[in-house]
Amino acid sequence: MAGFLDRAKEQAQRGITQGKQKIDEVQMQRAGTDLLKKLGVAYYEEKRGTGSPQATQQALQALESHIAANGDGFLRS
């Protein structure tokens, strides 16, 4: 009986770990998507004359930092 419980506990731990990894992945994708949206808004505002090149550059740098840290997989979703 103890062997069964040990295996069940191990499977539950694996499931928890996989769930946490998936949550982290989704959060990183959302953060990347938000940064990409902010870049688009900054660029649009700059072209309309209501934004600045500095704001666009800052948004681009934030996006590039995110990609460097987490990869660019969110761009393919």
Image (cartoon, grey):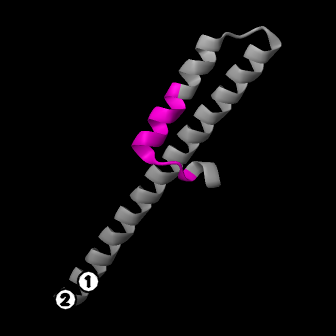
Q: Three-letter amino acid code at disc 2?
A: Gly
Question: Considering the numbered disc 1 on the image, is that residue within a helix, a strand or a loop?
Answer: helix
Magenta part of the protein: which range?
61-73
Using residue 70 as the reference point, say whether residue 39 is left or right of it: right
Using residue 61 as the reference point, say whether residue 15 is left or right of it: left
Q: Quadrant of residue 10?
A: bottom left
Check contact, mark 1 vs mark 2: CB within 8 A. Answer: yes
Question: Considering the numbered disc 2 on the image, is that residue within a helix, a strand or a loop?
Answer: helix
Confirm whether the magenta stretch covers residue 34: no
Confirm whether the magenta stretch covers residue 72: yes
Using residue 54 as the reference point, say whether residue 3 is left or right of it: left
Q: Three-letter amino acid code at disc 1?
A: Arg
Image quarter hosting the N terminus: bottom left
Residue for point 73% across, 15% down = 46
Image quarter hosting the C terminus: bottom right
Residue for point 43% across, 41% down = 68
Residue for point 17% across, 87% down = 2
Q: Which mark is residue 3?
A: 2
Report which residue position mark 1 lands on: 7
Does 23 sit above or below residue 39? below
Characterize the magenta stretch by its predominant secondary structure: helix
- Counting from the top left corner in percent of width and height, residue 19 is at 43, 61
Disc 1 to disc 2, C-alpha distance:
6 Å
Residue for point 64% across, 27% down = 38
- Counting from the top left corner in percent of width and height, residue 74 is at 58, 49
